[in-house]
Image: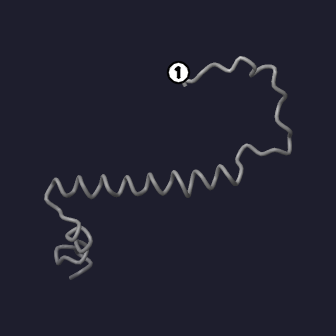
Amino acid sequence: MAYEEAELDILTRLPRPKQEHLVTVRLLSYAYFHAGVIQALGGMVAYILTMDDFGFTFGELVGIILKDYYPHNK
């Protein structure tokens, strides 16, 4: 917010109509489908790369739950 340009006419604008919602279908679709997918993929890539740095390859991460040292597999 510190780098946004000042809106000089903000107090001269009419208020929005009561029927107009703040959260619209367009906003929800952007938040969940566009930005949400990009953030989820970025998080998964960061997780996989971090685990790879610690010696766990992607193939090991996929099958790690099937290892014998997990109690539910005994």
Quadrant in which residue 40 is drawn: bottom left
Residue ranking furthest to the left: 55
> Residue 2 location, x and y as percent?
52, 21
- Residue that label 1 marks: 2
Task: Estimate the x, y position of residue 29 in percent, counting from the top left.
Answer: 62, 56
* Residue under the image location 50 percent in, 54 percent down: 36
Q: What quarter of the picture does the C terminus occupy?
A: bottom left
Q: Is residue 1 left or right of residue 42?
A: right
Q: Image height check: is 35 above or below 60?
A: above
Q: Which residue is more in the foreground, 3 or 15?
A: 3
Q: Quadrant of the N terminus?
A: top right
Residue 6 percent location from the top left of the image: 63, 19
Color scheme of the displayed model: one colour
Compared with 10, 27 (above or below) is below
The residue lying at 22 percent from left, 73 percent from top is 70
Quadrant of the rendered image containing residue 48: bottom left
